[in-house]
Image (tube, rainbow, N blue to C red):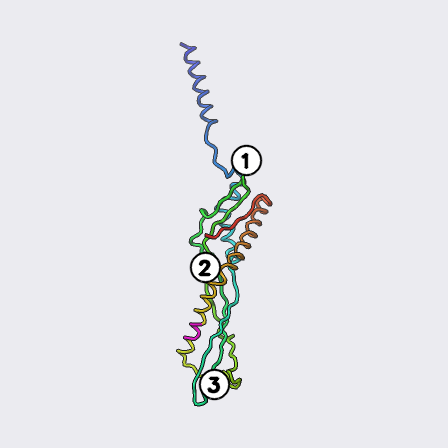
């Protein structure tokens, strides 16, 4: 009887040891080991996203736009024309409320960090009407004060200029803005790789959805 109790006790201890050693390890990106686990913590999708958010101002493409509109006036001496050029500062950036950690993929084995982002959007156009340039008329004699516009006409002319700038922005500036932002993201994440001791281990890829 004593032998039976002893054998049961030894068997129970052995079983407990197996259970204690057989727990599931925390998953890591692309491999295991202590170094991989530390890397996963320092380069998690959340930490990569936070690094981008911390540098949000660097991920804005800012440039100057101009638009020339023509005004004309008829009087006793005929029809007079004049061109007015308006200037504005325009900004294109990321739509942050549609970006999450799910947009980030890190493949340790393949050595790739991939960011999938929505196409950059227009952050706004800020006109500076004080910089407007007024050309001479066809005759070269008419000055700015000689073409009279009502306040409503001037407001409409400015609105038309900004609308045309918005069209130009969508048609001609999204692509260079995307290239600029992708380059800045690469710089930011390469800096993060250096800070976490992973310099040269990953290729940064930015994909636009």
Residue 46 rendering spot, x and y as whole percentages: 48, 46
Q: Check if residue 112 falls in the magenta segment.
A: no
Instruction: Look at the numbered disc 1 and give the secondary structure of its residue.
Output: helix
Neighbours of disc 3 within 10 Å: few (<14), some (14-19), many (20+): few
First in residue order: circle 3 vs circle 1: 1
Q: Which residue in the structure is indicated by mark 3?
A: 146
Mark 2 neighbour class, 10 Å CA radius: few under 14, some 14 to 19, many 20 or more = some
In the picture as drawn, the residue positioned furthest to the bottom comes out as: 76
Q: Earlier in the sequence, mark 2 or mark 1?
A: 1
Q: Hey, which quadrant is residue 111 in on the image? A: top right
- At a point 57% along the width and 49% down the height, the residue shown is 190
Residue extent of the magenta highlight: 156-160
Who's the residue at 46% across and 27% down the image? 22
Q: Between disc 3 and disc 2, whose residue precedes?
A: 2
**Residue 63 spot, x, y in % from top left:** 52, 65
Which is in the foreground here, disc 2 or disc 1? 2
Classify mark 3: helix, strand or loop.
helix
- Please give the residue where the numbered disc 1 appears in the rendered image: 34
Query: Which residue position is annotated with label 2?
Result: 121
Q: Secondary structure at mark 2?
A: strand
């Amino acid at each position: 009887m004593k032998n039976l109790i002893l054998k049961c006790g030894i068997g129970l201890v052995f079983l407990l040891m197996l259970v204690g050693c057989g727990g599931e390890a925390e998953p890591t990106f692309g491999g295991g080991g202590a170094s991989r686990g530390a890397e996963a913590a320092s380069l998690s999708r959340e930490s990569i996203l936070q690094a981008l958010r911390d540098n949000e101002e660097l991920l804005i493409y800012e440039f100057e736009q101009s638009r020339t509109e023509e005004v004309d006036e008829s009087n006793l001496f005929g029809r007079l024309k004049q061109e007015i050029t308006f200037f504005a500062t325009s900004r294109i950036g990321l739509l942050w409320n549609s970006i999450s950690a799910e947009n980030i993929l890190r493949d340790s084995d393949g050595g790739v960090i991939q960011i999938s982002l929505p196409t950059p959007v227009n952050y706004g156009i800020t006109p500076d009407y004080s910089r407007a340039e007024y050309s001479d008329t066809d005759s070269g004699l008419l000055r700015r004060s000689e073409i009279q516009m009502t306040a409503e006409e001037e407001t409409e002319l400015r609105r038309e200029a900004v609308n045309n700038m918005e069209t130009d922005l969508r048609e001609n500036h999204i692509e260079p803005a995307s290239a600029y932002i992708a380059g800045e993201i690469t710089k930011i994440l390469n800096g993060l790789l250096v800070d976490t001791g992973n310099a040269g281990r990953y290729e940064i890829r930015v994909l636009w959805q």
